[in-house]
Image (cartoon, rainbow, N blue to C red):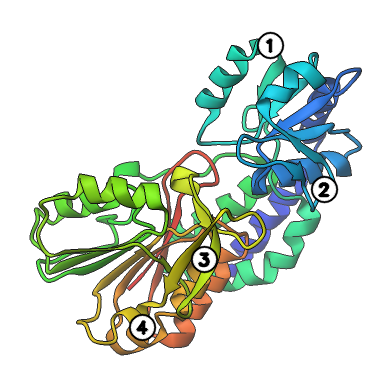
Amino acid sequence: MSVQSFEDEISSIREICNSEQFKERLEKVKILSLGKPLILYGAGTIGYSVARLLKHNHIEVSCFCDRNKNGINEESGLPIISPYQIPVQYPDANIIVCSVNYKDEITNDLIKLGISLDRIFYRDELYIYEVMWEDLLQHLDGYRRAFNLLEDIKSQQILLERIRCYVTSIPITVSPPESQYFDSEIITLNTKEIFVDAGMYIGDTAEAFFQITDNQYKHYYGFEPDENNFLSANLALQGKANLTLVKKGLWSSETHFLFDSGLTSSSKLDADTGNDYVEVTSLDTFFRDKEAPTFIKMDIEGAELEALKGAEQIIRNFKPKLAICAYHKPEDLYTLPELIKSFRDDYVFYLRHYTDTLYETVLYAF
């Protein structure tokens, strides 16, 4: 695709944002707030984005609801209540569930509290988009640069579709989910792989790696700072050979951070709301006296850029294959490939996407 194709697609996205059909979506949301409190379930990044969007369009939100947080959301100034407070304080409220991963669980919890299903709505089904067009403008130059770094048309199309999804919630073309991190269109593995699994979670990526390699690999290193996830992975991977599990996060240096633990797959480093201290290290430090990795995967909830900085010498000297999640921040699509390119200019880049939401976009580099 040409640079002109990029400009044409951006113009098309802008037209969608300005269309009457698009504006009608917000009118449907506005109806939910007429004469009744409107509560956003989920006080995280997505919840705040929704609150900001609704405020921009003069739609009043009463509060956030969250099982893991309380107090005041600093960005919006809105109170955060627990689910148990809804029937008491807001018995007739309409609720928009902003979480993607736990919709069913949240819905069941709300129903158990006596909240009827006709008062529960979902951000994705209402097509409430995540980023306002005005906010996206600051990233367009970066997206242009990323567009020109991508190796194939499919990658460029995914970049454009992701931009469109940010501001319209129109879905992105999905690759087979089972191929995530090991996409055979892009990545070839051999029996000598030294694999780094950053964001090991409960060992699911490890299991996929062992299956794809038919257990023929040199070494597996899993990094996971969340206590519960680490214990689950340790149990699941018992008996595997050439395995090192590290209960640390990855960063650009060796230090410690507050950590939002207990969020299963979404546990993350968070200096503002963290509930636990965890140790972090850099890959350059960890592998100083070990054979360098040949393949690095990262899904570490927005810490990817700093962790890549901490792997600069490995990348410069050994050029490992990389599969890096590029969906946690709007700027990931350009800051991640540009950083890698600054370490070595002979990397090529591909994008693939593995869900029907904004989650699970992977930047491949080799």
Q: Quadrant of the C terminus?
A: bottom left
Q: Label 2 belongs to which residue? A: 76
Query: Could you tell me residue 261's position as x and y percent?
Result: 50, 50
Position of 151 relative to 174 (above/below): below
Mark 2 element type: loop
Separation of marks 2 and 1 at Cα, in angstroms: 27 Å
Q: Label 4 belongs to which residue? A: 284
Ranked by sequence position, the earlier of labels 2 and 1 is 2
Query: Could you tell me residue 154's position as x and y percent?
Result: 43, 56
Residue type at the position of mark 4:
Asp
Residue type at the position of mark 2:
Ser
Total number of numbered labels? 4
Q: Tell me, yes or no, if residue 228 can be seen here.
A: yes
Separation of marks 4 and 3 at Cα, in angstroms: 16 Å
Q: Which mark is residue 303?
A: 3
Ranked by sequence position, the earlier of labels 3 and 1 is 1
Ranked by sequence position, the earlier of labels 2 and 3 is 2
Q: Is residue 87 left or right of residue 265?
A: right
Query: Could you tell me residue 275's position as x and y percent?
Result: 57, 53
Q: Are marks 4 and 1 in contact (CB under 8 Å)?
A: no
